[in-house]
Amino acid sequence: MSPDRETLAWLRLALVAELTPSVFRKLLSAHATPEAISGLNFATLARTAPDAMAAAIVRGPAPELLDATLRWLEEPANHIVTFADKAYPRLLLEISDPPPLLYVKGNLELLDRNSLAVVGSRNATPQGSANALAFSHELSDGGFTIVSGMALGIDSAAHLGGLSGVSSSVAVVGTGLDIVYPARNRALAHRLAHEGALISEFALGMPAIASNFPRRNRLISGLSRGCLVVEAALKSGSLITARYALEQGREVFAVPGSIHSPLSKGCHLLLKQGAKLVESSRDILEEFGVAIRKPEQTSTGHDKVDDNPILTQLGYEALDLDLLCQRSGLTPETASAMLLTLELEGTVNRLPGGKFQRVR
């Protein structure tokens, strides 16, 4: 479906590579609408924007990028959301530098749900990934859509946990939505597109550039009522997300760990700085005044099989980790974390020879 005239004006401005979000907002403040801005001459634009940006606006976006984006928007799951849209997340409007336009793939309704950020180390321990998975599943069932950055490690486990619960999950990425980064998370990205959502402020074709990820992190926290850090080293990008959360007036939670583990030091630093220590999802749900629901009694485990990609692929066969990863599309780290959680729950048994089997 082709965008209307107003939406096309938003898109044409957003695709001017030289135009920064802050100057975009200043132009909107001065001239009200993108259509009005697009009709201005260089001299008028230069009163608000630097000369290079004013000249770039007059030139307009690269035609091939505009054409590619319009083709992308023809797919039913693809959307752009602007300041002028009701679907624009209300919480993002509270931060100091919200992007004027967002690219979204998936369920638009998730953008304005109660959400919680769950972030942590890319090099997570199996226990850290299991914690992220369990917390996120329970928080999703408690009514919070799980927001994370689709990185390896804790982020991936958080998304899987959120998707397995009733409130789903949203990934905020640091690339264009036509690029999956990291490539190992392609299966997860596809699942998020179908069952959750992916969001970016970057135009299609934007590659993974280091400077884009802190910008992404401010949106992860900005979309969320709070931020849970599961595992983090002292120089972890997760601490950047936590700092943004504090600046944005969000709650910050941290899971404690061993004093000997480098991946606990970031969480311990946050706790020293006033983050709330959590040992279970109940701690977070109670902080937000969410009623704790007793788990429903069910006679079979069919629902759990449907929700969990490991159980879905495992059936009642005895399979090793490599085959499970091949069938489910999960990374070995994420699959190991999920298997550990299932073992602790008594749902899966570890067999000799490195194989796993569901408990009947």
Image: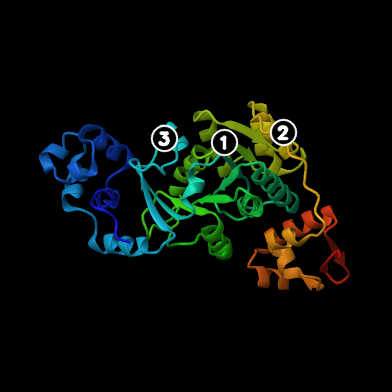
For residue 203, above or below residue 31: below
- Which is nearer the eye, 194 or 128? 194
Do tag 3 and tag 1 residues touch (Cβ < 8 Å)? no
Q: Position of residue 223 (x, y in %)?
A: 50, 40
Residue nearest the viewer, comparing 112 with 122: 112
| Mark 3 or mark 1, earlier in chain | 3
Confirm or deny contact between disc 2 and disc 1 (CB under 8 A).
Answer: no
Amino acid under disc 1: Ala
- How many marks do you count on the picture? 3
Task: Find disc 2 in the rendering and name its residue.
Answer: 283
Say whether marks 2 and 3 touch (CB < 8 Å). no
Residue 3: image quadrant is bottom left
Mark 2 to mark 3 CA distance (whole Å): 28 Å
Q: Position of residue 103 (x, y in %)?
A: 40, 52
Task: Return the residue nearer the eye: 243 or 221.
Answer: 221
**Residue 241 coordinates in the image, percent (x, y):** 54, 39
Q: Secondary structure at mark 1?
A: helix
Q: Residue at x 50, y 29 (%)?
A: 247
What residue is at 19 percent from the left and 42 percent from the top?
A: 37
- Residue 277 in sight in this render: no
**Which of the two discs, 3 and 1, sits closer to the camera?**
3
Q: Which residue is mark 1?
A: 242
Residue bearing mark 3? 93
Figure check: 68 above or below 139: below
Can residue 337 be seen here? The reply is yes
Could you give the CA–CA distance between mark 2 and mark 1, rounded to whole angstroms? 18 Å
Mark 3 Cα shell of 10 Å, populated few (<14), some (14-19), many (≥20)? some
